[in-house]
Amino acid sequence: MMKKLSIILFSIAGVAVATGCSDIRREPGLIYMPDMAYSRAYETYVVRDTNYFTMDSANPHGKIFYNARPVAGTIMRGEDLTFTLPKDKAGDSTYYVASKQIQNPLTNPGAADLKEGERLYLINCAICHGSKLDGNGPLYKGGQGPFPSAPKNLVSDPYTVNMPPGQMYYSITYGKNLMGPYGSQLDHHQRWMVINYIKSKQAANAPKPASTSNTEPANADAGANANTSSTTSAGTSATK
């Protein structure tokens, strides 16, 4: 009896092994957490289909919530504690205005820091603002690109030249007008490095102050000497 049972069990096991090793493709069974096994891919700079994605965390229709930002109330590792302002609600600019007071913690950047800031700028910002920071990137291309309006000129537009670093940081983090947010692409240190690079280019592009000429004082001294000589000569003649 035991021998027959063993033969039956071995036969079943052999069939299972042979079937499992077959080259015939079969559909898998139920997956406990399919989102973790098969992630939903998306393309950068492509508008997400609102039939599937939403940025509204309270969306009641079961869409996929995505904004690449840390969960509210949490602090990610390396978070910038010098900038704690949240994003303004639609139609408000309270925090945008307040961001003017935020100081850049990366003072006195060296050549290596500015070089890295330039690299990050070219990767993330030049597509719109241009490699020369003139607002003529590939997406605008002198009005021939897909963007209908020119991005801001970062080196000669008084609005951006006079913009405080903290306000630039706010715009990079949360986006502004047609500019999207880059808080998920650049960490806080990288954002300040990009700002330092932009400010360095603005300073290099600033008009040079007119140099003070020494012509007038020299002429004045010469005139004074001439008057003195004339007076002396006249006095001498009178004495004679």
Image: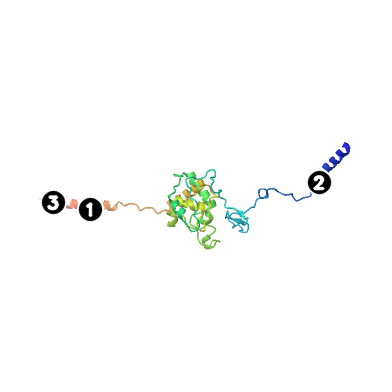
Q: Is label 2 in a helix, a strand or a loop?
A: helix
Residue that mark 3 sits on:
235
Of the residues under marks 2 and 1, which one precedes in the sequence? 2
In the rendering, at what x and y percent does residue 226 appear?
21, 52
Tally of numbered tags? 3
**Residue at image coords 83%, 43%:** 12
Q: Is residue 112 above or below residue 128?
A: above
Q: Nearer the viewer, mark 3 or mark 2?
A: 2
Of the residues under marks 3 and 2, which one precedes in the sequence? 2
Depth check: give the residue in front, 62 or 225: 62
Amino acid residing under circle 2: Thr
Amino acid residing under circle 1: Gly
In the rendering, at what x and y percent does residue 142 appear?
51, 61
Q: Is label 1 in a helix, a strand or a loop?
A: helix
Q: Nearer the viewer, mark 2 or mark 1?
A: 2
Q: Is residue 2 left or right of residue 133?
A: right
Residue 113 visible in the snapshot: yes
Residue that mark 2 sits on:
19
Q: Is residue 209 left or right of residue 187?
A: left
Residue that mark 1 sits on:
223
Alpha carbons under labels 3 and 2: distance apart: 131 Å
Amino acid residing under circle 3: Gly
